[in-house]
Image (cartoon, grey):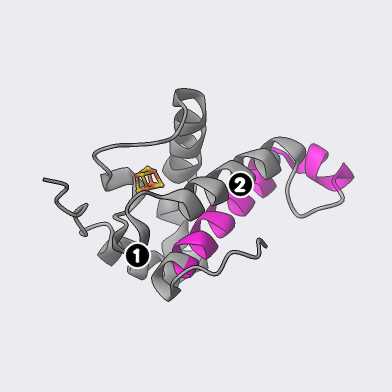
Amino acid sequence: MSDVRLPKRLAREELTIVEMIAMYCRDHHGEELARAAEGLCPGCAGLMAYARLRLEMCRYGADKPTCAACPTHCYRPAMRDRVREVMRYSGPRMIKAHPVLAVAHLVDGRRKAPDEG
Ligand code: SF4
Ligand SMILES: [Zn+2]
């Protein structure tokens, strides 16, 4: 975990992405994961570090929408594709594995980005 203190909702968003990447990694990279010292294979650990950095640097701060609903997506295209793949796989499975996080994420998904006008 990083040292940057995020507001409660963003901390929950961080936890949600951690769980989603961990689920994806367990189900797709079992062999690499068995050799990894951390809870993620190196590729997924890199994706997590990147997602965490984007979250911490998010231009919307405490008013952040979910990244999926963001009009100014700040991820590099390759990272965006990877995180989308994780979401496609883990999103539907979160309801069963982490219902509270999943419902909170669905509610957050209705947030709009603040007007920048
Ligand atoms: S994609 Fe949008 S909401 Fe997500 S971190 Fe980047 S600017 Fe913030
Ligand atoms: Zn992995």
Above or below: residue 13 compared with residue 100: above
Q: How far apart, in angstroms, are the residues tagged by discs 1 and 2?
A: 20 Å
- Which residue lies under the disc numbered 2? 48
- The residue tagged with tag 2: helix, strand or loop? helix
Residue furthest toward the left?
A: 117
* Viewer-closest of 84 and 60: 60
Q: Residue at x 44, y 45 (%)?
A: 87
- Which residue lies under the disc numbered 1? 62
Q: Is residue 57 left or right of residue 1?
A: left
Q: Residue at x 76, y 38 (%)?
A: 42
Above or below: residue 112 compared with residue 10: above
Q: Amino acid at mark 1?
A: Ala
- The residue tagged with tag 1: helix, strand or loop? helix
Q: Is residue 50 left or right of residue 32?
A: left
Q: Residue at x 22, y 52 (%)?
A: 113
Q: Which residues are magenta?
A: 11-36
